[in-house]
Amino acid sequence: MLTLAYSDLYNPAALGSNHNLESLPAGNLTVDPLFVAYDVEGIPSDYHLTGASPLVNAGDPARLDPDGSRSDMGAYGGSDAGGWDLDRDGYPDWCWPGTHAQAPTGFDAAEFDADDLDSSIH
């Protein structure tokens, strides 16, 4: 049996039905995640959340983000959020909502990768 917990199952109206997902277990959502960037066709090109995303601080309350707040939903939420280093250049991808340049108090953007798909950019 599949159990969904603290997931966002958003399906844009332009893509049709959301498969009757209106009655989900508590903690799950079907809202626009408001990612940082989309390509010209509206497909997410950056899965970091904006500061206005309803997924910020909406993840599992038993898990904390690196800043000590309740976890965000998605890849950049939870205690492991600050450990992504896809290009293996030694600089982890940023883990806060917003852009790389919008580092919150306590985070130095220079310690995080501005482009974690290009090892020549730190």
Image (cartoon, grey):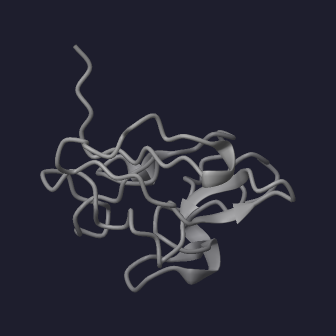
- Vertical placement of 72 versus 20: above or below? below
Is 99 rendered above or below residue 63?
Answer: below
- Give x and y (percent) for residue 96: 46, 68
The picture places residue 75, in percent across and down from the top left corner, at 46, 46
Most foreground residue, 110 or 76: 76
Q: Quadrant of the C terminus?
A: bottom right
**Left or right: 92 in relation to 118:** left
Image quarter of residue 87: top right
Q: Does 33 sit above or below residue 103? A: above
Q: Residue at x 67, y 56 (%)?
A: 46
Q: Residue furthest left?
A: 62
Q: Closest to the observer: 95 or 8?
A: 8
**Residue at horizontal 59%, vertical 54%?**
91
Q: Position of residue 56 (x, y in %)?
A: 37, 67
Q: Does 115 sit left or right of 82 as displayed?
A: right
Front in this rendered view, residue 2 or 99: 2
Q: Is residue 100 above or below residue 40?
A: below
Horizontally, residue 42 falls left or right of residue 6, namely right
Q: Quadrant of the N terminus?
A: top left
